[in-house]
Each structure stands twice: as structure tokens, then as C-alpha cells.
Amino acid sequence: MAGLKLHDLNWRGQHFSRFSDWRVPFIDFISDSKDGNAILSDRLNSFGMVVVTGFPVQNTEISKTITLLKKYTLEFGCPVSQSAKLDFLGHVTNRGRDISDHKSRGYESAVELPFHSDRCDLLSLLCVRRAPVGGETRIVSAYAAYLQLAQTNPSLAAVLCEPVPFDLRDTTGGPSWALMPVFTLSDGDFVARYVRRFIEASQRFEDAPRLTDTQVAAFDALDAILYAPGMSLDLRLEPGEWLLIDNHRLLHARTEFQDAPDPAEARLLLRSWLCWSGSPELPPSFAPTYGRTKAGSYRGGVWPTDRLLSSMSPDLSGARTDLLELLS
């Protein structure tokens, strides 16, 4: 991928937290939209993440915050649908959902969420209100985790470079599961796709390959690295902090949280799933999940049966036009 600094992705949270290069003040970002987008791209290419601080949310009507966020996300990338409800901006808040139900979504619960990647190129999270207790966003470099596993147990690292079954949780009438690797290294590039509960949920389909003891051992070894002390960067996002994560190079998790007694003060993050021009070429096996694999294309998301990804332009400029017409 042009511009990707793969060596910079080999970071650990305990060291990474000492630096501030991955933080960008909102005023610097908006001083020039072209330069501001270049700043975001540079940080994503270097570290796989960036936090824009000081986004106006306090003493601001939520509708105005949403309008402003949509403006900047559309300038930098292009959002995809996050559910069968055709929602391009999700409200991450506790609705009491049970994530053991394969139809439930983790972002509508208050429970701990394990390390995983989402069905998009970039994850965008803007904190409007934080929980009084818990709710930390945990971020880990999948590349650093892979390198450590390859060093300590190369045979298990090799297992994770081979296809494993994933439950697609598809709502479009497509395939129920698909085979794809957890880690892919090709031509100096790196891509990760890890959602263990989706891998394990694939076993509910009789025609999906059965997970082997060796594969389970590989997942356990990877999890031990991901959850090792000092491995992740743990952020208790403050109101006005806007986080962007490269979903193909980093994994994220969330700690359990307790909400404020007043529902009007409940934890709230605004979430978008974005495509962007700096996204990588994906392995062909990712097609059932992302729809398209070409670098910089409009892809991913979860779509309703009456509005499929295939109805949207594959290039970002065309997709923006389609999206504006769809939402008008």
C-alpha cells in the first residue's frame, strides 16, 4: 500500500502511550481541509490510528455535532451501512442487548467486548459522553501481535495465515460463512481479520469446516498476546475526542461499563464505518465479507436486502454521489 509505514505498526501500548504524534488538535485539522486530511492519512499510514482532540460536542446540540461529523467523514472517506437498518452513523450506547444472540450487536450492550476487527476499512468513533465507570477503548497492533507470535511459536502463527471459517452473519441472503485467514502478508503489506466469536459461531453451520485443536490453540496463543499487560493502548475517550482506526492493521476491544443513572447522560459515541483512498488491496477470500477487494474501493458494511452494496458505485467519488442521493 502506498504510504504505509509497516515498521511503525510494530508498537506496544505501554510505549506508544508515551508519545503524542497520534493526537491531532481539531483546530489543526480544520485549518485546511486538504492539509487536515493529509495529516489523518499520515497518522493512519504510520500508526494505524489517530485521535483528533477538541471536536465540538460540549454545549453543542447533538444534531449540530452529527452534521459536522458527517461533513468531515464524507470529506475524508465515505461511510458504508452498518446494519440492515441502512444506518451510516450509529449511536454506540447501551440498549441492553445480549451479544450471545448472533442477531445482536455488541455496540448496543454494556458488556466487555473482546479484541476484534469490524467489517470496514476505517472505524470512526466520536465520544459525546463517556461512562462514569469503565468503557475504555482498547487498541492493539495486529502486526505487532503477529510478529510476536511468529517469534515465539512460528507453527501457530503459520496456522493463522491459513483460512479459517467465519460466520458472516449476513442479512442479504448470501453465504452464511466464508473461509479467510486471520493474517495475510503479501508484497510488503499486512492485513488482519480477527473476530473470534464469529469464527466460533461458524460452527453452528453443519457445512462449515470443524475447527481443529491446533486452530483453537493458535487462537488461544494469539489472545494471550493481545491481552498481555502493556500490549494494548487503553483509551478512556473524553468528550470531543474523535478516534479513527485502521481495521486491517489494528484490533480493538472495549471494557465493561456502568452508565449514569440519568438516561440523558448515558455513554454515547457516534460511530461510522468508512472507506478511504488509502485502504489496501484485500485477499480474494475477503470478497464474501467486503464485497470488493480492490484498494481504495467502496466496500464492506452490512446492508439491507433492498439496498445492496452492489447497487453503489465501486469508486469513492461515485459512491459519495450515490450516498448523497440516497440520503437526500
Image (spheres, grey):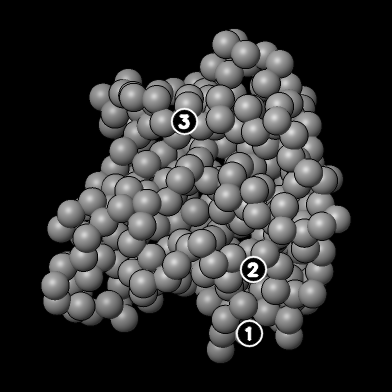
The residue under label 3 is 226
Q: Position of residue 92 (x, y in %)?
A: 38, 66
On the question of residue 257 being in view, the answer is yes
Residue at figure coordinates x 74%, y 40% from the top left: 211
SS for callout 1: helix
Which quadrant of the structure image shows residue 126? bottom left
Q: Which mark is residue 271?
A: none
Which amino acid lies under the numbered mark 3 shown in the image of this protein? Leu
Which quadrant of the structure image shows residue 69? bottom left
Which amino acid lies under the numbered mark 1 shown in the image of this protein? Glu
Residue at figure coordinates x 21%, y 65% from the top left: 259
Q: Position of residue 185 (x, y in %)?
A: 72, 27
Q: Are marks 3 and 1 in contact (CB under 8 Å)?
A: no
Callout 3 environment at 10 Å: few (<14), some (14 to 19), or many (20+)?
many
Q: CA distance from mark 2 to mark 1?
A: 19 Å
The residue under label 1 is 325
